Image: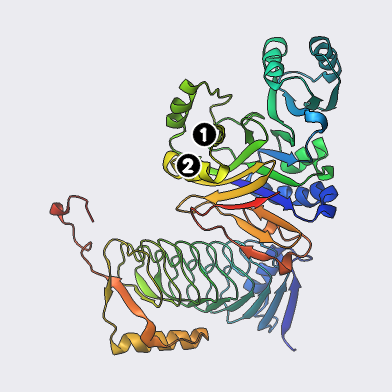
């Protein structure tokens, strides 16, 4: 296919591949990049800022697609800690599972994890969307400020602890909610949001099976009488 | 930061390649632990009830020939010595406690790395690749290994502070993380007559688990007790002559990845240390869940 650039990380150093993605792809008119033999390397396709379609074969290490802007990145494998951390826009799709802190601090874009996400998924989320096909580990959405997380499976302990304005939609069991997180009724807009995100993620579930978790906002203002018991 | 590495070979024909498969795993974890490394190798037990004792010559240049002569004058029977640089292994039917006492008085520059019927232990300071080359660790054979690359955060960089730690016989532990109450654990164990050889936090965990096993717990039960007794961050990987076990604390801050096939169970802090293994593309790859105990029989 014209405009497709192939890399093999068993042959080409990762730094060369990322330099191509950052600086050379646009000038060369390349829109599609295929990266073979990820083999757990760190920071694959981190820092992209062009509308590239990037396909990664194998299991990725830390920070795959970190700080991503505009690129659409697909991993045929698992992703290590911090996949899509601080993503600004674009899409990252993980075919397998994601390790800890998936989508940490993401400002925009869409992160789709077909399998499970480990602990701290969406920690400090700042506006991105995350759809997890499986379950998420404990402390997910901790201090999440904006954005949406759709969890098709279960959630571990302390889901949404100290949430700000981010909203969580969860389909399965929640082992425990974190401080100041609460279940709230689903509105029509919530059902529509879940439908839209599942559609974008290519995951098929009935939006009516999801529950909304959001902030009770009782931590928004200092309460001297709370005696640190939240 | 540190790197952990474990490999258990289910397929007997692979056991002669244990070192060949393990060495790239260990070297792959260099960036997580560039200052020291160690490897515990479990083999078929020594014959005739003999013990294997791994030794490290701490101060000065090693003279294992002279030590072997002095040893032979002290202990009856046949003893087999294998010395490489600062490291040696004795295979002997002499009682380990008597050997330990004799070494303390006659050769205090030497310390005991491990005692058991199956375990051989190597650890030293330096880059993992250098340590592999120094001791020929890419050629070892056996059923399973527990290995570690260290980036020291809480105590000195010396061979004794490197992992794996051992206690008792045929038991070792490596740790990625840090404990916040090792002194409490130590103050509990020392009055029971349990002696520590370093000020390292991991040694407290190692001696705690070994103490529990001597009190009758199996390793899994001992680890369950550890959830309340040991405070801090940990991914612990442990080996006995019979099993390989991994556990992570409730927060799972320290990574671990397992790849299991019909032929092996391979464990590392990160997948990049597993990527070279045969058939890993079709392995069952997963991360151990927090506070779940995973063990495999050797």
- Residue B163 visible in the snapshot: no
- Residue B3 visible in the snapshot: yes
Mark 1 or mark 2: which comes first in sequence? 1
Quarter of the figure with the N terminus of chain A: bottom right
Locate residue A92 relative to residue A25 in the image: left or right.
left
Residue B226 tag number: 2
Q: Does dot 1 land on a helix, a strand or a loop?
A: helix
Compared to residue B206, the image places residue A8 above or below, namely: below
Query: Chain under label 2?
Result: B
Residue B190, image x and y in percent? 49, 23
Residue A78, image x and y in percent? 61, 69
Q: Nearer the viewer, residue B116 or A140?
A: B116
Q: Does dot 2 land on a helix, a strand or a loop?
A: helix
| Label 2, residues with CA under 10 Å away: few <14, some 14-19, many ≥20 | some
Residue A17, image x and y in percent? 70, 69
Compared to residue B170, the image places residue A195 above or below, namely: below
Query: Chain under label 1?
Result: B
Tell whether label 2 touches label 1 (CB within 8 Å). Answer: yes
Locate residue B139 relative to residue A155 in the image: left or right.
right
Q: Quadrant of residue B86?
A: top right
Q: Residue shown at 40%/84% (left/top)?
A: A194
Q: Quadrant of residue B88?
A: top right
Q: Residue shown at 68%/44% (left/top)?
A: B242
Locate residue A42 relative to residue A136 in the image: left or right.
right
Which residue is denoted by mark 1 in the rendering? B208
| Label 1, residues with CA under 10 Å away: few <14, some 14-19, many ≥20 | many
Compared to residue A117, the image places residue A51 above or below, namely: below
């Amino acid at each position: 296919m014209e405009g497709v650039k192939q890399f093999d990380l068993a042959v080409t150093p990762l730094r060369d591949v990322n330099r191509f993605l950052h600086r050379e792809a646009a000038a060369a008119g390349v829109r599609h990049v295929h990266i073979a033999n990820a083999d757990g390397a760190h920071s694959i396709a981190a820092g992209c800022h062009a509308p590239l379609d990037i396909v990664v074969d194998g299991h990725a290490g830390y920070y795959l697609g970190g700080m991503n802007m505009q690129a659409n990145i697909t991993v045929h494998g698992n992703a290590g800690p911090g996949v899509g951390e601080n993503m600004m826009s674009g899409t990252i799709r993980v075919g397998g599972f994601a390790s800890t802190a998936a989508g940490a601090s993401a400002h925009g874009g869409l992160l789709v994890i077909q399998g499970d996400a480990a602990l701290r998924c969406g920690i400090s989320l700042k506006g991105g969307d995350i759809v997890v096909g499986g379950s998420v580990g404990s402390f997910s959405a901790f201090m999440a400020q904006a954005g949406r997380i759709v969890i098709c499976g279960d959630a571990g302990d302390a889901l949404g602890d100290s949430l700000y304005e981010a909203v969580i939609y969860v389909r399965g069991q929640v082992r425990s909610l974190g401080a100041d997180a609460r279940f709230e009724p689903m509105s029509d807009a919530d059902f529509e949001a879940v439908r839209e995100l599942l559609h974008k993620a290519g995951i098929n579930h009935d939006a009516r099976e999801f529950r909304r978790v959001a902030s009770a906002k009782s931590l928004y203002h200092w309460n001297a009488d709370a005696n640190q018991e939240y | 930061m540190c790197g952990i590495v474990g490999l258990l070979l289910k397929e007997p024909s692979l056991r002669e390649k244990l070192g060949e498969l393990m060495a790239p795993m260990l070297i792959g974890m260099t960036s997580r632990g560039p200052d020291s490394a160690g490897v515990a190798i479990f083999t078929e037990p020594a014959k005739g009830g003999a013990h294997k004792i791994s030794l490290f010559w701490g101060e000065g240049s090693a003279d294992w020939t002279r030590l072997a002569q002095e040893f032979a004058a002290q202990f009856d029977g046949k003893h087999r010595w294998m010395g490489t640089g600062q490291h040696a292994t004795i295979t002997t039917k002499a009682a380990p406690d008597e050997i330990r006492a004799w070494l303390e008085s006659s050769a205090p520059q030497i310390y005991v790395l491990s005692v058991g019927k199956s375990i051989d232990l190597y650890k030293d300071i330096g880059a993992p690749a250098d340590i592999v080359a120094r001791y020929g660790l890419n050629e070892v054979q056996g059923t399973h290994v527990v290995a570690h690359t260290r980036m020291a955060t809480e105590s000195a960089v010396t061979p004794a502070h490197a992992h794996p730690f051992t206690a008792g016989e045929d038991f070792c532990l490596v740790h990625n993380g840090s404990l916040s109450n090792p002194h409490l654990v130590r103050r509990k164990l020392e009055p029971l007559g349990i002696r520590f050889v370093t000020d390292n936090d991991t040694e407290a965990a190692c001696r705690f688990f070994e103490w529990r096993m001597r009190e009758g717990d199996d390793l899994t039960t001992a680890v369950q007790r550890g959830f309340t007794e040991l405070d801090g961050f940990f991914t612990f990987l442990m080996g006995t002559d019979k099993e390989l076990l991994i556990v992570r604390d409730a927060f799972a801050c320290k990574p671990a990845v397992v790849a299991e096939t019909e032929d092996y169970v391979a464990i590392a802090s990160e997948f990049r240390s597993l990527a070279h293994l045969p058939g890993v593309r079709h392995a069952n790859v997963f991360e151990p869940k927090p506070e779940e105990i995973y063990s495999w029989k050797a």
